[in-house]
Amino acid sequence: MTTKVLIADEHALVRDGLRHILRNAIGFDVVGEASDGATTIALIRSTDAHVLVLDLSMPGRSGVELIKQIKEEKPGLRILVLTMHAEQQYAARAFKAGAAGYMTKESASAELVGAVTKVAAGGVYVSLAMAERFAQSLNEPADTLPHQRLSDREYEVFRRMCAGETITEIGEALCVSAKTVSTYKSRILEKMQMPHEAALVRYAVRHKLFDDNDEV
């Protein structure tokens, strides 16, 4: 049986590369592509497929919230996250939202075919590097850490704040008003019991939440 695959990534070059890898492998057919959250939703509504290879950082609605919406509308569609975000906490939220696989873009060329195959067959795929991160997290204290109290949207705003984005930039990326982002910021500071944004950044660095090369 041919595995029908959808690709959702903002960058045409990345989509071209993924399409090339899959079409050169046996048993795969790329049946649709999308470049942002809105077109991804339209695509999964109009095109039958087995697996969606999904980037977490596209314009419009993206990330964990997009995974949740896709699973609500197409519960049978298997989602393989392909992203620059290598942090364990982000992967855990993606799986909780309904993803069946998680891998970073740096490992895509070597692992993509095997990952799509396993996810399409009903399995769960985690890259070796990410599996090691999950294993290491088992040794962390059982008590809830401050950042684990955040909702998925609050965590996304927290991540973007730590990456140096302004309130206006975050609002544009998440398609919400600057006022709404400011509200999220206040909630984040309150939930994490931090006095200001600089303290959030220090916290993120101390707990190694985001890689130095993490892109939003």
Image (cartoon, rainbow, N blue to C red):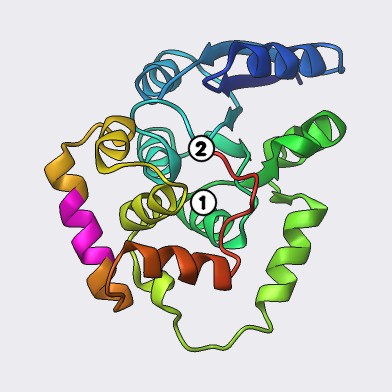
Residue beneath disc 2? 56
Gap in angstroms between the C-alphas marked 1 and 2? 9 Å
Question: For the magenta stretch, what is the residue range?
Answer: 182-188
The answer to if 127 sits in the magenta stretch is no
List x then y, in percent, for residue 129.
Answer: 79, 55
Dot in front, 1 or 2: 2
Quarter assignment of residue 91: bottom right
Q: Which of 22 and 2 is in front in this view?
A: 22
Residue 161 relative to residue 206: left or right: left
Q: Where does the image place residue 77, in percent across and percent down from the top left?
A: 53, 33
- Nearer the observer, 49 or 167: 167
The circle drawn on residue 85 is none
The residue positioned 64% from the left and 21% from the top of the image is 5
Q: Residues within 10 Å of mark 1 (few under 14, many from 20)?
A: many
Q: Which residue lies furthest to the front in this view?
A: 198
- The quarter of the picture where the N terminus appears is top right
Determine contact: label 1, label 2, CB under 8 Å. Answer: yes
Q: Indicate the secondary structure of the residue bearing disc 1.
A: helix
Left or right position of 16 against 193 = right
134 above or below 184? below
Quadrant of the rendered structure where residue 183 is? bottom left
In the image, residue 144 lies at what x, y percent? 44, 82
